[in-house]
Amino acid sequence: MAILCDESTKLLVQGVGRMGQFHANLSREYGTQVVGGVAPGKGGQVIAEMPIYDTVAEAVKDSGANASVIFVPPPGAADAILEAADAGIALAACVTEGIPAIDMARAKAALKGSEMRLVGPNCPGVVTPEQCRIGIMPAQITRPGPVGVVSRSGTLTYEAVDQLSRLGIGQSTCLGIGGDPIIGTNFIDALTLFEADPETKAVVMIGEIGGSAEEEAAEFIQSEMSKPVAAFIAGQRAPKGKRMGHAGAIIAGGKGAAADKMAALERCGVAVSASPAEIGETLAKHAPGVAG
């Protein structure tokens, strides 16, 4: 049982510019069922081997799409998210960076009560090794196995996955949740899924400075999780008041510092890696039975 996506997933691409076409092809080459694209005004065309539809609703009705990856530019991305939800898409991963916070606040509010799970925005998406690729992750570095990976950072997701694979430790699902202040799926949401997944035996969690998501996740891990968790916090040398990379990665009001997050995780039984180069080794030591 894979979480979020598997070989039965039928993927729709919203936004079929160069980036959308490029990653649609990579996902198809990986074995993902890419069933169509959405580009208003271009319905009826075939682009990058995808039948193109004017609306998500038309695409769902014709192709049976149940997942979407969103490459729509920032001004229209929030509306694209809501269009996917209204059409009955079960999972949408929004890659788009730079969506105005007010637009995402509106979209987040509108999604309350929706059955669609949103991953992102400003995220690399989801990979279930050897089954499905949604987004922009380099899926070739993954391998099937028992470790779930969830991260706010895209590049550190890839780094952690590569380290695990080189150690002979496969992954159940690799999930980048995005680094914006307002996102659809947070750490606790992902940890809940991994805890319930019988194929996931341990979890790697990669956080960063800014906000309180990691501290909240630490409390959840201590009270709700039976599976070992290893973590890394990026931005350990970041100066207060400076944004480091992601829009949500800013220390403000005395909260969000890396040291505080690391201490909270350690208090709750999480093995914390001091260096990004040691993420895989930290997990291997904390959960010695996961190597394949």
Image (cartoon, helix red, strand yellow):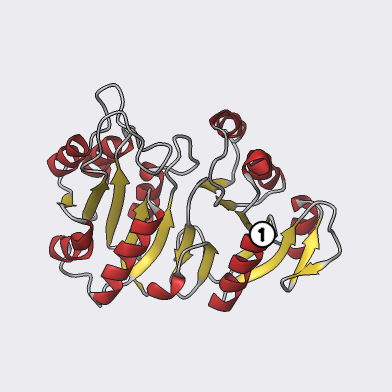
Residue drawn 17% across the image and 63% down it: 287
- Side of 117 relative to 234 (left or right): right
Q: Amino acid at mark 1?
A: Val
Screen quadrant of the N terminus? bottom left
Residue lying at 18% horizontally and 55% vertically, measured from the top left: 275
Residue at left offset 18%, top offset 34%:
260
Q: Can residue 147 be seen by looking at this rendering?
A: no
Q: Is residue 275 left or right of residue 139?
A: left
* 168 vs 114, nearest the viewer: 168
Q: Number of numbered discs present?
A: 1
- Residue 267 vertical placement versus 172 (above, below): above
Asked where in the image residue 256 lies, by quadrant, the reply is top left
Residue 17 % position (x, y): 69, 59
Measured as percent of width and height from the top left, residue 148 is found at: 34, 60
128, 125: nearer the viewer: 125
Q: Secondary structure at mark 1?
A: strand
Residue 60 spot, x, y in % from top left: 74, 57
Q: Label 1 crowding class (10 Å Cα cut-off): few <14, some 14-19, many 20+?
A: many
> Which quarter of the image is occupied by the C terminus?
bottom left
Asked whether residue 117 is in view, the answer is yes
The location of residue 263, given as percent across then percent down, is 14, 39
Q: Is residue 57 left or right of residue 174?
A: right
Q: Quadrant of residue 210?
A: top left
Q: Label 1: which residue?
A: 13
Instruction: Say if 58 sits above or below 183 in the image.
Output: below
Q: Residue furthest top?
A: 253
